[in-house]
Amino acid sequence: MDWMVISTWVFSFPGNRLAAQKLKAGCSAVEALQVLAASVEADPDVDNVGYAGFPNCEGEVELDAACMDGKTMKLGAVAAMKGYANPFEIAVRVMRESPPNLLMGIGAEEFAARMGYAETELLTESNQKEWMHRRQELDSANIRQGEAAFGHDTVGIVALDVNGDMAAGTSTSGLAMKMRGRVGDSPLAGSGFYVDNDVGGAVATGLGEDIMKGCLSFHAVELMRQGLSPQDAATSAVCRLHARLERMGKPVGNMAVICADRFGCHAAAANHGSFAYAAATAGLEPAIHTVDPCCG
Ligand code: GLY
């Protein structure tokens, strides 16, 4: 069976290359996700994921992550978790070792500590300075908490291994300057991620508040189940949700989805013009694919 790995945004390219090497050597789809997510989470230049993620309104870095196994349909997720630099790894432990699927806040942190992970300071000096500056601006303009949140570039990954098994997952610090306790789509099954070996997988990136209104990842997978190609499924899922939200007369948030079927054919769609993703397959070296907006 041919392997494949796709991951959101240009910043996932180095991790995609590492995951491709592992898949080529025969590792599992979940292991490929672990390698890729760990690479992005540890990168201090990526300020939307893991270490150096931008803080919430209170100056705290709260992380969300999730992993789903397309063979067993097991999933694990952590949300609004503070103090641990490798949330994706902890989500995998939740998937494998905890009765609940989703642990949040202090519950996720206690679970991570029990599993032996060390607490880490995630807030970098430069992010703290920028946070203080933005916080002063908000306070002086009397802007309500969470109203000036920005940026939401999740790393989302779908992989297919040589055994024909698939996995999908996400990791993000969510919106910068978000309200404390705000959780986006990334750790929510169906919204931020979904995978089923029988069909394929999908992951989303963009404004979680809008993505979760359409269960974007589940919708893309279900369209593939109905027989649509990955490209048609991604485009239909994004455009349907965008059109539905547009009818409400308010600006629709940026959103994008990447998806792949169980044969390793992959595609993406976005309602804005700045999205790109990394892809590697058994036949093609890792490369960046830019995505033209399909609507919006
Ligand atoms: N899509 C990531 C978030 O909204 O938090």
Image: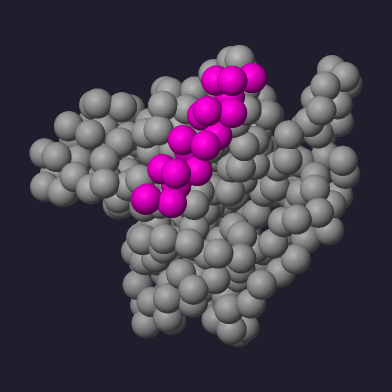
The answer to which of 156 and 142 lies nearer the viewer is 142
133 is within the stretch colored magenta: yes
Q: Residue at x 41, y 60 (%)?
A: 44
Task: Report the magenta stretch's main SS.
Answer: helix
Q: Left of 219 or right of it: where is 192? A: left
Q: Left of 89 or right of it: where is 148? A: right
Q: Give the magenta-colored segment's residue range.
A: 124-141
Can see residue 257? Answer: yes
24 is within the stretch colored magenta: no
Q: Is residue 136 above or below residue 78?
A: above
From the top left corner, tell me how far across and down residue 54 is, in percent.
47, 43
Residue 129, by quadrant, is top left
Q: Left of 210 or right of it: where is 295? A: right
From the top left corner, tell me how far across and down residue 253 is, in percent.
73, 34
Q: Is residue 147 above or below residue 197?
A: above
Quadrant for the C terminus in the image: top right
Q: Residue at x 17, y 32 (%)?
A: 110
